[in-house]
Amino acid sequence: MANNALIGTLVEVQRRTALVSGDDGAEYHCQYSPTIDLKSFSNFAVGDRVEFISAGSQQEAMITAIQPRTSQISRPGPKDRLASELILAANVDALLVVTAVSRPEFNPRLVDRYLALAEIFSIKALICLNKIDLDSSIPKELDYLMGLGYPVVRVSAKAGLGMDDFMQALAGMSVVLSGPSGVGKSSLIRSLVPGALPRVNDVRKGDGKGRHTTTSSHLYRIGSGISIIDTPGIRELGIRGVTRGGLAELWRDFRPYLNSCRFRDCSHTGEPGCAIQQAVADGKIPDFRYQSFLRIQDDLEEAG
Ligand SMILES: Nc1nc2c(ncn2[C@@H]2O[C@H](COP(=O)(O)OP(=O)(O)OP(=O)(O)O)[C@@H](O)[C@H]2O)c(=O)[nH]1
Ligand SMILES: [Mg+2]
Ligand SMILES: [Zn+2]
């Protein structure tokens, strides 16, 4: 590392430039040094820790190196590109699975999908139940997931409820926002980052109401050592790169039963002597967990 190099975190990435939040507290507009070898990094991503040099101006700095990543969230790269994968976010501690009590209707199957993704990327998962101003009860499925060790924080981005608990649960962590459209991910950012205006697309719907869907990635540093990454790519992320046998391993509550099926290659979809189906029948595994597993297994088969 050059002795005049600074260190910082990439908060926004464009093709030719990037915005870096320096550890000195300042923001730098950077270009990329052409000497950086991207072979082992594939591409720059929000959350990357970088070394950069600045000749006195925050407007004209240059990134000279990427530091090794501790974790990453990625998807297969586009076919016309050389890299085999596209890194969506780097150095992520947890997936923040945002869901709402209603509007849109609480959907445990989608929550399970994101929990499985977190298991694939070997990062923690935290569940954020938003819109508790509309209904203060906790869906029974979330009670069950809490019992499996997935923390749940209840908030209302709109009414500003639960924000202290939220900050406490996320302290010191870098998290990636995930969850279906409309649950309030951008609203959460706006309530935590005064003046933040997440980049959005103005999708006009038939009813004339604007729908603002996040379109580019950004990392927000919000105090208490918390970074929140908003990246649109997360929504299209499929469950990939797992075998049928490997899929069941992603369901924490299935793991204790997996060695007890009669057939070693049991798909848990109808074989006799299936320990998973027995556990569902006995009420040890709730039906919604089994249904979300079946749904994703179907998707895997369709994708080949
Ligand atoms: N009642 C209530 N409404 C909320 C709350 N948080 C967000 N909303 C509303 O929910 C709608 C969707 O919020 P967004 O923040 O745009 O949702 P999003 O998750 O970012 O959606 P995408 O960007 O499409 O993925 C908006 O109309 C918000 O005003 C909340 O705590 N309570
Ligand atoms: Mg949004
Ligand atoms: Zn089985």
Image (spheres, grey):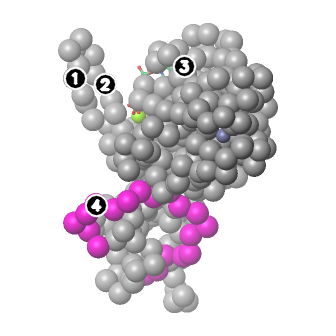
Q: CA distance from mark 1 to mark 3?
A: 24 Å
Label 3 neighbourhood size at 10 Å, few (<14), some (14-19), many (20+)? some
Q: Which label sits in the foreground, 4 or 2? A: 4
Q: Which label sits in the foreground, 2 or 3? A: 3
Q: CA distance from mark 3 to mark 4?
A: 33 Å
Q: Residue under circle 2?
A: 211
Is there a contact, CB below 8 Å, between mark 1 and mark 3?
A: no
Q: Residue under circle 3?
A: 106
Q: Amino acid at mark 1?
A: Arg
In this image, 141 relative to 63: left or right? right
Judged from the image, the secondary structure of the residue bearing numbered disc 4 is loop
Residue 98 on image: x %, y %: 55, 32
Q: Residue under circle 1?
A: 204
In this image, 19 relative to 174: left or right? left
| Mark 2 C-beta to ligand 1 under 8 Å | yes
The magenta-colored residue range is: 64-82
Is there a contact, CB below 8 Å, between mark 2 and mark 1?
A: yes
Quadrant position of the N terminus in the picture: bottom right
Image label count: 4
Q: CA distance from mark 4 to mark 2?
A: 27 Å
